[in-house]
Image (tube, helix red, strand yellow):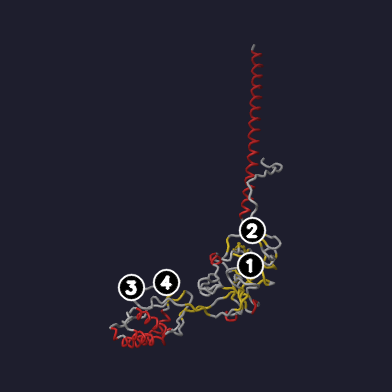
Amino acid sequence: MLHRRTCRSSKLRGQGGFVITLELIIIISILGFGTLVGIVMIRDALVKHYVSKQSSETLVADAAGRVLGEAVDYDEHDAPRIFLVDRSKETAFRTLISIRDDRFTSREAVYYSGSNCTGVPCIKTTSDELTSSRGTDDLSGTGNVSYFNALQGGPNYAVGRGDQGLPGNLFRESEFMCPAEPSQIQSRWMSQKVVSGEPCESTQLDDEVKTPPFTGCLIDAPLAACDCPASTQEQGNILSLYTVEIEALLDSIVLTLNTALFITGQQIPAVNVGKICCPIGSNLNEDEVVNGVVYIVLEELVSQLDLAAFPAAQQNINATLAPLAGDISCSSPLILKAADSVSDPNNPEDNILGTFSGPFWVNLPSTASDDWYSVPPTEGEGW
């Protein structure tokens, strides 16, 4: 009896194992098939998303179809701008290059020692508001200053004349000074100009850059402290050299003006000369400082009087002040650095832009479609 029970128990254990294994195979098959279907659907969705993304991207290519990059934004002329990475040095930097149909453009200009953009190429330093406040339209505040280059804490970049003229080469500020003095510069490549043909123009630079000083603190107010604005510095060391001459001339002119103002019942009060502030890095010019300071002080004091009913007195005052009108200014040396050609990482003998040729073009959006296209999986995919 005991033997029979043992055999029956072994049979039951064998049958039970078989049932469990069959159920496991069915479960694994269902899960595996569902996973495969899910992977294919996800892949199809990713392909559709990628195609849709390509349709919305603007890619810039040259005449041979070589893609230069994706447009990150557009300049004021609707030219797409791309990031160009300079890896020719140990530290890599980016710069923004705009691409038109026939040329590369940059915010900065390249200056040349010879006419027609020939000779030694030079470039200004980054964030140079003092010398580049005027742009191609000659309006103040629209200058060719690339703040992106300045924000990197690295060299300045600019598009200059190419080996064949257009479309242009990329240049980088070097650590060396320009071999030519600023006054010896004869031309510059203003790639951002809208012009037919090469954007090369004649130019003349001074060795010094003149900017107007801040004179809001020139009249000393004893009850209120007046400080030079940020990014400027007081020129007291220069102004103190002419204190005696300024005060003597100021007292003399005030006496003359008060005589003319006697009939108005108003007088110009005695004042002390305060501060003149120049942009940091510049100094006050001494040429017209005496007459200029006296003129600015008296112009401000006279403007505070009510002379509407006394035109004769106003005319006498204007005639007295006219000879004093002087152009006081701050000056700073114009710094130009030698410009190096940015080499192609694949061929150091060529410029990084030298292998591309126009006309340049951008891709068109693909035809919109909501259809799904299933792509068969490759062998082994999904496992």
Separation of marks 4 and 3 at Cα, in angstroms: 15 Å
Camera-side residue: 86 or 362?
362
Mark 1 vs mark 2, CA separation in Å: 15 Å
Neighbours of disc 2 within 10 Å: few (<14), some (14-19), many (20+): some
Residue at the far left: name it. 265
Which residue ends up furthest to the top in the rendered image? Answer: 1
Horizontally, residue 364 falls left or right of residue 292, namely right
For marks 2 and 4, give the one nearer the viewer.
2
Res 59 label: 2
Q: Is mark 3 on a helix, strand or loop?
A: loop
* Whether label 2 touches label 4, CB < 8 Å: no
Q: How crowded is mark 4: few (under 14 residues within 10 Å), some or many (20 or more)?
A: some
The tag earlier along the polypeptide, 1 or 2, is 2
Which of the numbered marks, if any, corresponds to residue 229? 4
How far apart are the two marked residues, 3 and 2, measured between alpha carbons?
59 Å
Distance CA(mark 2)–CA(mark 4): 45 Å
Q: Nearer the viewer, residue 186 or 155?
A: 186
Kind of residue indicated by mark 4: Pro
Q: Give the number of the disc on residue 115.
A: none
Front of the two marks 4 and 1: 1
Residue corresponding to mark 3: 224
Instruction: Note whether residue 179 is visible.
Output: no
* Label 1: how many Cα within 10 Å (few below 14, some 14–19, many 20+): many
Mark 3, mark 2: which one is toward the viewer? 2
Residue identifier under label 1 = 104
Q: Nearer the viewer, residue 274 or 91?
A: 274
If you read the primary sequence from the N terminus, does the residue marked by circle 3 or circle 2 appear first?
Answer: 2
Q: The residue tagged with tag 1: helix, strand or loop?
A: strand
Q: Nearer the viewer, mark 1 or mark 3?
A: 1
Q: Considering the numbered disc 2 on the image, is that residue within a helix, a strand or a loop? A: strand
**Residue 179, position in %: x, y?**
61, 78
The amino acid on which the numbered mark 1 sits, given as a three-letter code, is Phe
